[in-house]
Amino acid sequence: MAIKHWQDPVNLVLGAWLIVSPWALQHAAEAAPTWNAVVLGILIAAAAVWAMFRVMAWQEWANVAFGLWLIASPWILGFAGVTAALYNAVIVGIVAAALALWALGTDRDIGGWWSHAH
């Protein structure tokens, strides 16, 4: 299997990190940030795995949306006071969205607005 975008395996790792992060960062007793991290981790990882097998623009756009949700979720779900969960959600959200936008912007087959060959 040849992976087209290096960003997809990185987003897979970010998704896996999100799944285990409530326990690693010791905020698993807090329901909202725990469920948010686990569900979004599964979604980001699933979109990344799918993109590693067959690249389509929707997978990258999904990870952009998931990343944006992660950035906003501490305030929407009310866990901005849980510092570790707040920073984790915002940082992972920024990185996941940026990586997906990078893949979209540089791949002519699914967008390529940033591609030199476009």
Image (tube, rainbow, N blue to C red):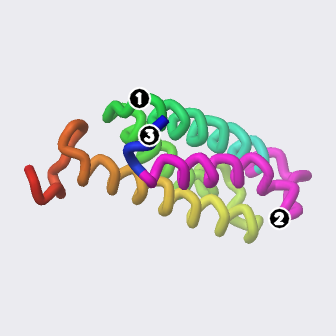
Instruction: Pick the residue in front: 84 or 5.
Output: 5
User: Residue at 25% of width from left, 47% of height from top?
Assistant: 107
> How far from the left and from the top, in percent, is residue 78?
68, 54
Mark 3: which secondary structure? loop
> How far from the left and from the top, in percent, is residue 37?
70, 48
Is residue 103 depicted above or below 38 in this figure? below
Residue at numbered disc 3:
2
Residue 91 colored in magenta in the image: no
Residue at numbered disc 2:
25
Which span of residues is magenta-colored? 6-33
Q: What residue type is labelled 3?
A: Ala
User: Residue at 57% of width from left, 66% of height from top?
Assistant: 91
Q: Residue 95 carries which label?
A: none
Residue at numbered disc 1:
54
Q: Are marks 1 and 2 in contact (CB under 8 Å)?
A: no
Q: Is residue 65 visible?
A: no
Is residue 24 depicted above or below 103 in this figure? below
Q: Is residue 27 left or right of residue 70?
A: right
Residue 31 colored in magenta in the image: yes
User: Residue at 49% of width from left, 51% of height from top?
Assistant: 67
Query: Hey, which residue is sitting farthest front in the picture?
Result: 1
Q: Earlier in the sequence, mark 2 or mark 3?
A: 3
Instruction: Pick the residue in front: 5 or 110.
Output: 5
> How far from the left and from the top, in percent, is residue 20?
79, 51
Q: In this view, does 4 lie to the left or right of 66?
A: left
Q: Which amino acid does label 1 sit on?
A: Arg
Mark 3 Cα shell of 10 Å, populated few (<14), some (14-19), many (≥20): few
Instruction: Pick the residue in front: 6 or 66.
Output: 6
Instruction: Pick the residue in front: 64 or 35.
Output: 64
Report, in whole angstroms, how far the alpha carbon at label 2 lies from the one at label 3.
34 Å
Report, in whole angstroms, how far the alpha carbon at label 3 lies from the one at label 1.
10 Å
Q: Which amino acid does label 2 sit on?
A: Leu
